[in-house]
Amino acid sequence: MSTRLIIPGLNGSGPGHWQQHWLEDDADAVLVEQRNWARPDLGEWLVRLERAIYEHPGATLVAHSFGALVAANLAGRPAASKVGAALLVAPCDPDRVRSLHPGAVGAAALPCAGAAFPTLVVGSRNDPYMRFSDAKALSERLNGGFVDLGHAGHVNIDSGHGRWPAGYRLAHRLENSDGRRIAQTFAAAPSHISSAYLRSPS
């Protein structure tokens, strides 16, 4: 099994968050540490992520919120060639983060280039940090797949996503396939099956 690099967002992923459970459950998971979790800086966070990627070539990126934005911005950078795959869960729009947390986020932008590695964006229809249509557009910009998680909030503790087994299954399938094929699988599946598979907060 490849290394999974866990990339949290604003304020990190504390006790009870599905990323924290992942770190505890998966012996091959490694947290990408940041100097200041309370004030995300895209440039600084990218450098730390790239450092972790070079230490763990071929790793799968498991990113949430601002962490997903950082991972998406690897597109077009040299370290992207060392990434195995990326699962981007509930990515954020930096402008929305600024409006909800004034002063928390410095300069940051959505990526412009396509990703050089299999990518799957997992979006929510009522995520306060990114419009659903923008999450879908991000997946298209990255040449990746997209999974509609329904009304799942920000896919965090507040929305009932503690240990999130569906995330493990999506990462496993992504590592053995690609984002677009996974998205096509769920687009073709009956809604009640895809819903049961993906919505498994606990």
Image (tube, rainbow, N blue to C red):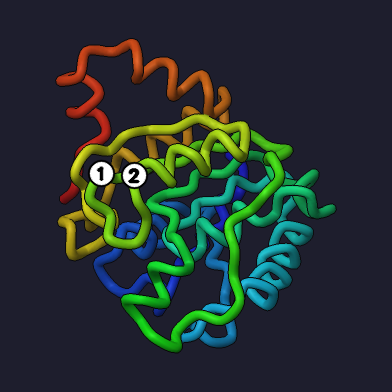
Image location of residue 33, percent across then percent down: 57, 75
Task: Give the answer, above or below, for where 95 lies relative to 60.
Answer: below
Q: Amino acid at mark 2?
A: Phe
Q: Quadrant of residue 165?
A: top left
The answer to whether residue 175 is left or right of residue 37 is right
Q: Is residue 114 above or below residue 74?
A: above
Q: Are marks 2 and 1 in contact (CB under 8 Å)?
A: yes
**Residue type at tag 1:** Arg
Q: Position of residue 190 (x, y in %)?
A: 22, 13
Give the labeled residue for mark 1. 125
Query: The N terminus lies in which quarter of the figure?
Result: top right
Query: Within 10 angstroms of label 2, few (less than 14), some, or many (20 or more) residues?
Result: many
Checking the image for residue 23, the label placed there is none
Quick one: which residue is furthest to the right in this view?
78
Label at residue 132: 2
Name above or below for residue 74 compared with residue 198: below
